[in-house]
Amino acid sequence: MLNTLGIDALSESVYRAMLAHPGESISGLAALLGLDEDEVRQALTRLSAMALTQGGDGTVRALSPKAAMDLVIARRQSELATAQKSLEESRVAATQLIAEYSGLLPTADDPNFERLTGADAIRERLAELAAEATHEIMTFAPGGAHSEADLAASREPNADLLARGVRIRTVYVDSVRRHAPTLEHVGWLHARGAEVRTVASLPLRMIVIDQNRVVLPTRMSDALEGAIVTHGEGVVATGTALFEAVWAGAAPLGSSPEPSASGLAPQEAEVMRLLARGFTDEAVAKRLGVSARTARRITADLMERLGAPSRFAAGVRAVQRGWLASS
């Protein structure tokens, strides 16, 4: 009956038995339900992870039906809100996936797609596209700190673009604000007229040129392995819309990212959102442009502040406090 809320039939039976027989032992519950004690223990573990039971020191009690259902429904609402928020980035990811794996893979004579292989080919083609730009270049630059050599190499082309009146808008992740060489480079760009903002995390690396070309990596895990250049109308429109949506919510360089309505720092709010979506610490770290150790530290701190024994329970309690709803 409660499987639509994420509660399996066995766990539901144990939960109902606990409500009907408060204080009953594990062996007693097993006898009442005709189950093995191990099955009851496993169900109790699942119920505890969902924060539907409370207790310690050998005693466990079931939350009241109203409190339990409030928690479960709040969790479902959070999942729906998170799914809605990720819709735009999912559209871009889906476009990339289709381009890479379906019958829409670019061929040698496809006028809409151009495939680049290897870092050198990508750099050369990007330089050509930049030289041809006449209006604007919009960039998502995820990954955190950039090497000083890469930063230095990009200055002359950027200076040329700005001198020609090409608008440059770039979104970095917030973590660059703590890396002196990258921050210095971003300041250099900003001082020459480029517009720079930061957000807690970025969904992918992307460059939109004159709103008629989009450059996307063929692999999310390694942007320098290969790339696709396309002027397909659908991909360009989606990429442009995604950039504008992220840009609107990003913090301009020179200002501090504002805390969410819940009081969480933007990076903390983003970690909470990614954890609710099932991201691992390593995946969270990559999205934020920080080390896995830093991601684990932020996660542990959030769980401690929530008093949550598991990530699932942390998500439920975050919804109760309004953390996920406002992140």
Image (cartoon, helix red, strand yellow):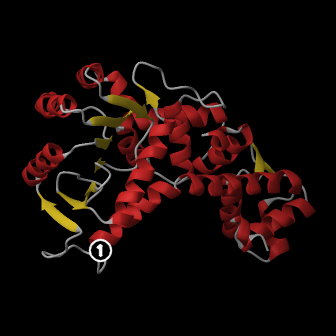
Amino acid on which the number 1 mark rests in the picture: Tyr
Q: Quadrant of residue 14?
A: bottom right
Secondary structure under badge 1?
A: helix
Q: Nearer the viewer, residue 45 or 101?
A: 101
The residue drawn where x is 11% and y is 29% is 156
Q: Does residue 55 appear left or right of residue 187 in this picture?
A: right
Can residue 23 be seen in this snapshot? no
Q: Position of residue 4 (x, y in %)?
A: 72, 70
Can residue 170 be seen in this snapshot? yes
Name the quarter where the C terminus is drawn.
top right
Q: Is residue 95 above or below residue 212?
A: below
Q: How many marks?
A: 1
Q: Quadrant of residue 151?
A: top left
Q: Position of residue 10 (x, y in %)?
A: 73, 72
The residue drawn where x is 36% and y is 39% is 292
The residue drawn where x is 51% and y is 37% is 249
Q: Does residue 296 appear left or right of residue 30 in this picture?
A: left
Residue indicated by mark 1: 101
Q: Position of residue 275 (x, y in %)?
A: 53, 47
